[in-house]
């Protein structure tokens, strides 16, 4: 089985380097720029070329090839994900079984530990403290498995609520500072103040409809955690008594109240 080393893309997606021989046998001259004497490095990424992210990958590969001209040649292939992570992820999974993985892949952040545990990716070379300082702790934590660093995300992502300034000003609502956030009760009171204004505008005070797929967990887990709940046990093996805890029941009842009170669709 081919192994990969991870470098990375986002809190959702990271990059990985694989070791061994892939199924693609490329000879010098087959790819523009790949010359005799160079080590060929194949790379798959999860996006399409005609996007800012895709262009960033192209530029990174070009910079690498310029810096290591005559020694290494990196060749990138774009394989987009669909909304639920299929397409690209499906091809990765199939290639794990067939042994046709490339040398470098982008990896969805939550998959790093599973890939590392199954020897699909290999650890990065040890980084200096100065190199580590360029990354957020969350990126380093996400890319670490069994005390070894396998992946580095090129970007971090998070979730939050954004608001209409004019409507909040109309309702006389002041947005709190980051270190003094609204409580759930205060947020509910604000939605109640906004409801008559939004009724006149034929809308809802809150647009927080639950999406389909993995986004539901990604978007709404912070509510569970903020109420003292969790999704699985600390060892990752148990959900009974954890996912259905009294804290999580309270969180779900809060979401239900937002709909029952017609604060959201």
Image (cartoon, rainbow, N blue to C red):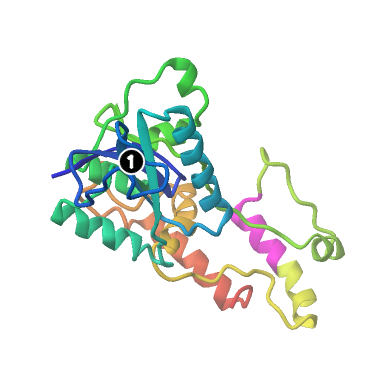
Comparing 112 with 25, the one in front is: 25
**Element at label 1:** strand
Residue positioned 62% across, 78% down in the render:
262
Magenta stretch prevailing secondary structure:
helix
Q: Quadrant of residue 81?
A: bottom left
Q: Is residue 129 left or right of residue 206?
A: left
> Can you identify the residue that label 1 sits on?
16
Determine if residue 37 is in view: yes
Comparing 46 with 109, the one in front is: 46
Q: Is residue 23 above or below residue 38?
A: below
Q: Quadrant of residue 239?
A: bottom left
Q: Is residue 76 above or below residue 207?
A: above
Residue 35 drawn at (x, y percent): 35, 38
* Count of numbered labels shown in the rendering: 1
Comparing 64 with 190, the one in front is: 64
Determine if residue 240 is in view: no
Residue 207 drawn at (x, y percent): 62, 70
Q: Quadrant of residue 195?
A: bottom right
* Quarter of the rendering occupied by the N terminus: top left
Part of the protein shown in magenta: 182-191
* Quarter of the rendering occupied by the C terminus: bottom right
Is residue 57 shown in magenta? Answer: no
Residue 232 drawn at (x, y percent): 29, 51
Residue positioned 34% across, 46% down in the render:
29
Q: Is residue 47 left or right of residue 165?
A: left
Residue 67 drawn at (x, y percent): 47, 28
């Amino acid at each position: 089985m081919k192994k990969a080393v991870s470098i990375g893309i986002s809190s959702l997606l990271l990059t990985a380097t694989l070791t061994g021989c892939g199924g693609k046998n490329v000879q010098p001259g087959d790819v523009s720029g790949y010359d005799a004497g160079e080590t060929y490095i194949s790379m798959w990424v999860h996006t399409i070329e005609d996007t800012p992210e895709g262009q960033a990958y192209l530029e990174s590969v070009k910079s690498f090839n310029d810096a290591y001209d005559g020694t290494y040649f990196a060749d990138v292939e774009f394989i987009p994900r669909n909304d639920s992570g299929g397409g690209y992820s499906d091809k990765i999974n199939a290639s794990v079984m067939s042994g046709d993985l490339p040398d470098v892949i982008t990896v969805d952040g939550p998959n790093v530990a599973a890939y590392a545990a199954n020897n699909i990716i290999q650890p990065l070379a040890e980084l200096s403290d100065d190199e580590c300082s360029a990354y957020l702790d969350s990126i380093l934590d996400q890319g670490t498995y069994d005390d070894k660093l396998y992946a580095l995300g090129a970007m971090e992502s998070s979730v939050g609520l954004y608001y209409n300034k004019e409507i909040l000003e109309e309702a006389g609502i002041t947005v709190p500072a980051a270190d003094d956030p609204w409580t759930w009760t205060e947020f509910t009171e604000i939605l109640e103040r906004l409801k008559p204004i939004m009724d006149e505008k034929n809308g809802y005070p809150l647009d927080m409809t639950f999406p389909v797929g993995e986004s539901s967990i990604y978007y709404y887990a912070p509510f569970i955690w903020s109420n003292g709940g969790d999704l699985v046990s600390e060892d990752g093996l148990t959900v009974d008594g954890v996912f259905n805890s009294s804290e999580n029941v309270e969180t779900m009842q809060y979401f239900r109240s937002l709909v029952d009170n017609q604060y959201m669709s």
